Image (cartoon, rainbow, N blue to C red):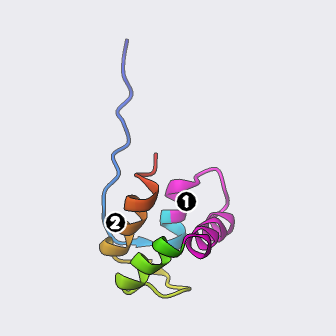
């Protein structure tokens, strides 16, 4: 039986919408971004850690540090 290679998630610079789509690939870019924004607003600990990483609302590009905060709270996307 042939195995498909697993998708490996790599920490790098991602756009906000791009990372949101990694977590919710079945959603449109806008819907995935809305989902991420809701997660941030509903989770004060996530928002605090993102702000410590210099995240600001409506940022278009996420640093690897900001991305690692998402991974810490949400796990790696599949």
User: How far across and how far down the image is residue 67, in percent?
Assistant: 38, 68
Residue 65 against residue 55 in the figure, above or below: above
Mark 2 — residue? 68
| Residue at image coords 66%, 56% | 27
Q: Nearer the viewer, residue 44 or 63?
A: 44
> Which label belongs to residue 21?
1
Q: Residues within 10 Å of mark 1 (few under 14, many from 20)?
A: many
Residue 52 against residue 5 in the figure, above or below: below
Q: Residues within 10 Å of mark 2 (few under 14, many from 20)?
A: some
Asked if the magenta segment contains residue 39, the reply would be yes
Q: Nearer the viewer, residue 75 or 22?
A: 75
Q: Secondary structure at mark 2?
A: helix
| Quadrant of the drawing holding the N terminus | top left
In the image, 40: left or right of 13? right
Among the two numbered marks 2 and 1 on one chain, the one whose residue lies closer to the N terminus: 1
User: How far across and how far down the image is residue 2, in percent?
Assistant: 36, 17
Residues in magenta, as a range: 20-43
Residue 59 against residue 44 in the figure, above or below: below
Q: Nearer the viewer, residue 70 or 47?
A: 47
Determine whether label 2 and label 1 are within 8 Å by CB: no
User: How far across and how far down the image is residue 26, in percent?
Assistant: 64, 50
């Amino acid at each position: 039986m042939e195995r498909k290679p697993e998708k490996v998630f790599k920490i790098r610079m991602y756009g906000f919408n791009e990372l949101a789509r990694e977590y919710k690939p079945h959603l449109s870019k806008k819907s995935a971004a809305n989902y991420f924004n809701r997660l941030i607003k509903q989770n004060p600990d996530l928002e605090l850690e993102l702000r410590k990483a210099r995240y600001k609302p409506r940022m278009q590009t996420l640093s690897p540090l900001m991305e690692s905060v998402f991974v810490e709270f949400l796990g790696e996307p599949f």
